[in-house]
Amino acid sequence: MFKYSAKLACVVALVLSGCGGAPEQQPPSETETLKSSEQGLIWACDGRRSFNRYWTVNGVEVGREYCDCDGTLTEFGTLSGRYSQTLNFYCN
């Protein structure tokens, strides 16, 4: 009886040690590029620069913002999704 229990315990231990777990992942190769959805810093409309900001969703423009040197921010449409900013000029 003891031999049977010992053999059963060994079999269970072997099965449990060989099961489960995710396959080992390899680190990315040097030629593999990782994509990121991180955006750059959003500029504040504080009178230091004049700029335009364009908001897009799935490649379609959904909103715009215009910042003037006096700190006035004019908004049009929906301000959500991804954005791009273009600098018009630095203010004095």
Image (cartoon, grey):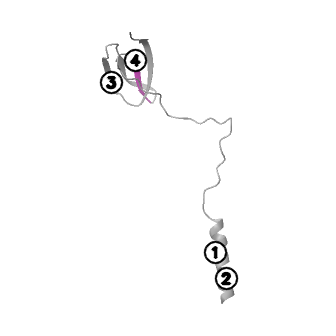
Which amino acid lies under the numbered mark 4 shown in the image of this protein? Answer: Asn
Q: Nearer the viewer, mark 2 or mark 3?
A: 2
State left or right for residue 92 relative to residue 27: left
Using the rendered view, name the quadrant where residue 11 is placed: bottom right
In the image, what residue type sits under mark 1? Val
Residue at the image point whose x is 49% and y is 33% from the top? 38
Q: Label for residue 6? A: 2
Image marks 4 and 1: residues in contact by CB distance under 8 Å: no
In primary-sequence order, the first of circles 2 and 1 is 2
Quadrant showing the C terminus: top left
Region rendered in magenta: 51-57
* Mark 2 secondary-structure assignment: helix
| Residue marked by disc 1 | 12
Q: Nearer the viewer, residue 41 or 12?
A: 41
Question: Label 2 vs label 1: CA separation?
Answer: 10 Å
Residue at screen point 47% across, 28% down:
40
Please, is residue 49 above or below residue 77 in the view? above
- Chain-order first, disc 1 or disc 3: 1
Q: Residue 52 bears which disc, if any?
A: 4
SS label for mark 4: strand
Mark 1, secondary structure of its residue: helix
Choose the circle earlier in sequence order: 3 or 4: 4
Q: What secondary structure characterizes most of the magenta part? A: strand
Q: Which residue is mark 3?
A: 77
Viewer-side label of 3, 4: 4
Task: Say which amino acid is labelled 2.
Answer: Ala
Instruction: Compare marks 2 and 4 and give the one earlier in the sequence.
Output: 2
**Which residue lies at the image location 64% right of the left edge and 73% below the top edge?**
13
Dots 1, 3 in contact, CB < 8 A? no
